[in-house]
Image: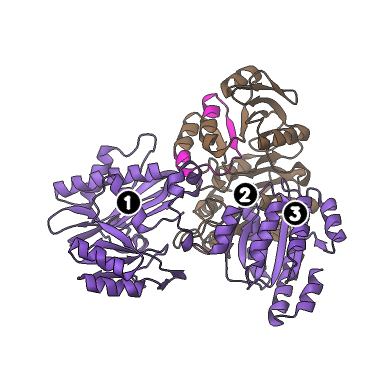
Amino acid sequence: MNIHEYQAKDILRRYGVPIPPGEVATTPEQAAAIARKYGKPVMVKAQVHAGGRGKAGGVKFCPTPEVAKEKAAQILGMDIKGLTVEKVLVAEAADIGSEAYVGIIVDRATKKPVFMVSAAGGIDIEEVAATTPEKILYLPVDTRYGLLPFEAMRMGFFLYQDAKQARAAAKIMHQLYRAFMETGCSLAEINPLVVSPQGEVIAVDAKMVIDDNELERKPDIEALRDETSEAPSEVEARKANLTFIKLDGNVGCVVNGAGLAMATMDLVKFYGGEPANFLDIGGSSNPEKVVNALRIITADPSVRAILFNIFGGITRTDDVANGIVTATKQNPLRVPIVIRLTGTNEEIAVRILKENGFSAMTDMDEAVQKAVELATQSGSTQGARGATAGAAR
Amino acid sequence: MSVFIDNSTRLVVQGITGRDGSFHAKQMIEYGTQVVAGVTPGKGGQRFDGVPIFNTVAEAVAATGANTSVIYVPPPFAADAMMEAAAAGVKLIVCITEGVPVLDMTRVYPYVREHGARLVGPNCPGLITPGQSKVGIIPGQICTPGTVGVVSRSGTLTYEVVFKLTRAGIGQSTCVGIGGDPINGTSFIDALQAFEQDPGTTAVAMMGEIGGTDEQEAARFIEANMTKPVVGFIAGQTAPPGRRMGHAGAIISGSSGTAEEKIQAFRDAGVGVARRPADFVPLLQERM
């Protein structure tokens, strides 16, 4: 789960990380009022879950409250990578002497959280890693011992020659590490970490990504979720315990299991179609899940055909068949459906489907080809209800 | 022959009285797995389908000589269950549980290793050596004994491929589901190494997916160390970057972990590339 910069900063402040003051505004007037209260130049920063906010024009320096109002008016409502800006952070602008990068990620290779620190901050760290890898220090941490003081000092001195600044940075490393562990992050970064002309080390921007698997035991972190920043269909799917990701194509996919769901999308592409979504109904699917899945998929106007691909292991294919029948009785389909199912209780499932006017296939490739074909046809004859209804039955 | 499990596997089921644990314990017993013990704290002394239940794994091991454990406990308790099994001296620990926080795994992984145990999973379907033993949730009826080793990060995608193999008359030595989490106990390389050493395995089918570099490292291992043919598939060629595709580990971070780079690594290492699940059958037939 992504959280906003202002939320990440609130968390880091609680752990003692020095961060210039800032508050959230949802109107230009509020932005101006915050700037006036600080009595100093401010940064107005779009709060959306997207990288490259600066390049998109979503981060502006504002010397006066009037400018803050004007810039906030421009940024609020702006579209950044498909996301509408609903909030801005108005933060005291820091005087910047030098910029460094500090981040922690869970590293799959070492199976540990790994610090990445670099004196080349303020820019994309992936770029630094690709072009000048020697400018990054990688430091894996054994979580059973935690970050050790000498490790933090080593990173401090890697960034700064001045002992006082190195110590200040080391202290921030400890604070960041504790925040990372206790919040349940998969990524936390401060970029940039700056030294002011007065020699103070402060965090100017922060980012945190939370491991979704932590949310159940951390309701206070779950409460930070901003549903306005997600596609409504994805919010609905999460509430129905489905894993759903919206894509740009026109073949709606309903699959059990994440690997098979990805392989199904890939096969749609292989046969010349485009998947409209990733949707995993999970292992022990009850008919209710199928009903919810169909509702979410059919709500997408770009879907021209629906493809079920179910491999019954733990999932009982008759449960899925019952779900399809129930769902289509409640909401008759307006687009053709192709159902492929095989495995546990396949004979019962096929009988249920046949009795209700559906046909079922058993081969994955044939089913995907059929769905792609139907999506293409129904896409080119939009509104040809007779044809689509015929195909559905 | 086989890897990791066979008819000498003596299994303890952690969480045997839970919803998933009880269902799959029955299935494993039906398949012929030697389920010798169950563990549910507070239910020690009771029985499940004739299997004695213990309060702790240590008691279960002492009383029954269990050498393998399978875990079906809910995510908040899974880390402790894995470490409990390792401390009790179990040598193979298979964690089926999905949703284990990754930071928990940063503690579990070194702990299990230091106790000399192998962990498979978490968030995996487990293993099956057809005709001998099944540990986990892979449906027994889709498998048939043979000489192809199967290793995969996925569940149902594995079933899809294994079922296709079985129908084409290609049997399996062992199927190993290593799981879809970013930190897992057994990597592709661990499984490949075991298959290379197993005289009962003549070829390997591997199913990877987007995220991380495990497949790229496996490709380098195959090129340097394997004499047996390998055919590979990568799921997620159409997955958008930055999104977690169901599995916690299936995410393209920045520009790394894409399907293209993994497929290229396979090609460079001489691994047969299945572009569709159905391609496994002809590609394996050519090579065996």
- Marks 1 and 2: same chain? no
Q: Residue at x 72, y 77 (%)?
A: A378
Residue A267 in view in this figure: no
Q: Badges 3 and 2: C-beta atoms under 8 Å apart?
A: no
Chain A in the picture: what colour? purple
Which residue type carries mark 2? Ser
- Residue A342 falls within the magenta-colored stretch: no
* Residue B126 in the figure: left or right of residue A117: right
Q: Badges 1 and 3: C-beta atoms under 8 Å apart?
A: no
Image coloring type? by chain
Residue A146 in view in this figure: yes
Is the residue A65 above or below the residue A281 in the image?
A: below
Q: Position of residue B176 (x, y in %)?
A: 64, 43
Q: Residue furthest bottom?
A: A381
Is disc 1 placed on a helix, strand or loop?
Answer: helix
Closer-to-camera residue (A79/B22): A79
Location of mark 2 (residue): B152
- Marks 1 and 3: same chain? yes
Query: Of the residues tagged 3 and 2, which is closer to the observer?
Result: 3
* Residue A10 image label: 1
Is disc 3 placed on a helix, strand or loop?
Answer: helix
Location of mark 3 (residue): A320
Query: Of the residues tagged 1 and 3, which is closer to the observer?
Result: 1
Closer-to-camera residue (A316/B102): A316
Categorize mark 2 by other alpha carbons within 10 Å: few (<14), some (14-19), many (20+).
many
Using the rendered view, name the quadrant where residue B36 is placed.
top right
Magenta stretch, residue numbers: B84-106
Q: Residue at x 25, y 39 (%)?
A: A150
Q: Position of residue A312 (x, y in %)?
A: 74, 50
Q: Residue at x 32, y 53 (%)?
A: A9
Q: How many marks?
A: 3
